[in-house]
Image (cartoon, grey):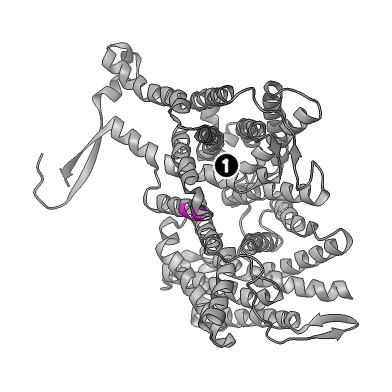
Amino acid sequence: MTVSNGQRRKERIDRGIKVRTEGIYALSSLRELSYLSVPRLVLIIGMLSLPFAMPSIYWQRVITITCIYALLALSFDFLAHYVGLVCLGGAFFVGTGGYLAAIANTTFGLPPWVTVPLAAVVGGSLCTLLLMPCLPLRGVYFAIVSLMYPLLLARVIEALDILGGTDGIMGIDSFPNRWVEQYFLIGILLLLTFGVRRLVNTDLGLVLRGVKDNDQAIRASGMSVTFYKSIAVFIAAVIGCLSGAYLVHIYMWSGISQFALDFSILPIAATVIGGGGTLVGPVLGCLLLVPISELLRDFGTLRIVFYALILVAFIIFRSEGLMVYGQRKYHQFERWTEV
Amino acid sequence: MQILIYGTINSISLALFAIGFAMVYGVSRLPNFAHGALYVLSGFITWSFLNAVGMNYLLSIVLSMLATGIIGALIYQFVLIRVRGMEISEIMASYALGLAILEGLRWRGFRGMTYTLPSFIEGSTEIAGVSVDYQRLLVVGIGAAVVALLWLFTHYTRIGLALRGMAQDERAAMMLGIDSDRMAVVAMGFGSMLAALAAVVLLPLGNIVVEAGYNVLILAIAVCIVGGLGSWVGAVLAAFLIGFAQILTVVYLGAHYQMVVALLAIILTLILKPSGLFGQQKELEERV
């Protein structure tokens, strides 16, 4: 269609195949089936083959760290876009999970297979309990209070000189070998990504989205807003503590730097770049950001400047993020129409 | 006596940190997370004017305040104005800019013990048996002067009245012909200049370090939240509350606890009374 001049706008229409694949008709032909499964398979196979694609042990380690950040970004995205709680304190979860795993491993001698799930569940409950009084807070107030929690815990550990003080806890067991270390983590990441995607479409997910959009409506329906918020925080905290516990076993060391702002900021940057609210976007965002930041390691702190500026540019010019953009191109076609 | 004197000095410095942050938030509801970065940046600008360009101290102070004010206004005009009203994007964008400024300074090699500003007046005196140097006395004087001048400015000048109008009711102010966006730029410029003022007054007491940016930000947030976001009187009173609490903990518990006090103050205030001690926000806006 040719439009010569004058007022025109872009019209977006769903592709026919998108509509067909929404119901049982998805099973009608191979084309429909692959329309649904190819993007998911690309992610799964891509993630599983990543360790083989990496040239050196150093880069395989980068992949592991990327997966840790991806888990954190996933938990941030879930809380921010499905429950409406913007938690700037991802480091709080990492630190709690990390220290719990470290204590369980060094003091009680439990192997990583026990400490990681244990730290995830216990740490998740602990974080939820500590955050419980702040849950009625909204918007910017919750954001500020959650940002302060990890800073406070770090200062308290420093001031009281407990848990190894500024030296941290050393001598933590590592995983048997690097393949186990990587594939276990990639498995967890894929499982949780698809699991959380499934979760937000269940009845519980519906209520949580209600909490985000209109909490007074939830309250009017006779449900406790704080109760549902604490369930959501528990889920996010378990994911965060899991990644923290895993990190501790990779580095074989647990210290105050696990409460550092890196663990709060980088996942958020990844979510903004990858596309908030898609749950897969943040994972892809991490796959982009962490290796880039690793490549820039030679430039010292310039890499932080670099990703801070990327973040600002995305917030201003492309606030929807890559994944939302990609989904739109995949599901819809566009054409110019005259107004 | 020592507690009283140093408590007052500490409180006034906290008020100086916070007043720019409180002004920007009060006028345009913008939590300026780049505040601490602007503070450190103006310290380094003053240092560069003084040592690299070789200018007069007073001139370099004035120039660096102007420069910081302009940088703040530009940040608002070109970045933050586009995300106005989206609180989380505001926080993220301003925080990222602050991070970029601070880490950029660190990358340029501004670190270590070598960066200090000279005191305005050398020497010290004794008040009631406690030795206090003149610079600290000057902090008290300038801090009090700033608060007084700000009060006069917001009550007796056109721009000041317009800013106060925006702070109280943005829509009504717009109806009276006040350009909301331009006023927000002015507020951001003034807020940055106040951060710069705090920097040039307080930095001669120690070294200029990049890490100070993060602490100043936390202290400014603590003061503003305890006092009630958007309340300028509350911010000044809260500065005294936190200032004395910090000095008391330093004397009786140890220097490590200074930041713990500020962080605990933020968390407890938000849990117990999110609108702060003197805030006028409506309950429903902030909690369910």
Residue B283 as seen in the image, left or right of residue B101: right
Is residue A271 visible in this depiction of the protein?
no
Drawn side of residue A12 relative to residue A162, left or right: left
Residue for point 75% across, 28% down: A105
Q: Is residue B67 above or below residue A144?
A: below
x and y, in percent, of residue B173 in the image = 47, 70
Q: Which residue is mark 1?
A: A85
| Residue type at numbered disc 1 | Leu
Q: Nearer the viewer, residue B4 or B232?
A: B4
Quick check: A223 above or below B24? above
- Residue A238 rendering spot, x and y as whole percentages: 64, 30
Q: At numbered mark 1, what does the secondary structure look like: helix, strand or loop?
A: loop
Q: Quadrant of the N terminus of chain A?
A: top left
Name the outermost residue toward the front: A56
Q: Residues within 10 Å of mark 1 (few under 14, many from 20)?
A: many
Residue A52 on image: x %, y %: 45, 25
Quadrant in the rendering for residue A22: top left
**In the picture provided, is A286 more to the left or to the right than A19?**
right
| Chain letter belonging to callout 1 | A
**Residue at x 71%, y 42% (from the top left corner):** A255
**Considering only vertical position in the picture, is A261 above or below B102?**
above
Asked whether residue A203 is in view, the answer is yes
The spot of residue B44 in percent (x, y) is 56, 72
Q: How many numbered tags mark residues here?
A: 1
- Does the segment drawn in magenta span residue A267? no
Q: Main secondary structure of the magenta part?
A: helix
Examine the rendered structure and indicate whether residue A284 appears above or below residue A161. Answer: above
Residue numbers of the magenta segment:
A302-306
Which one is in front, A259 or A327? A259
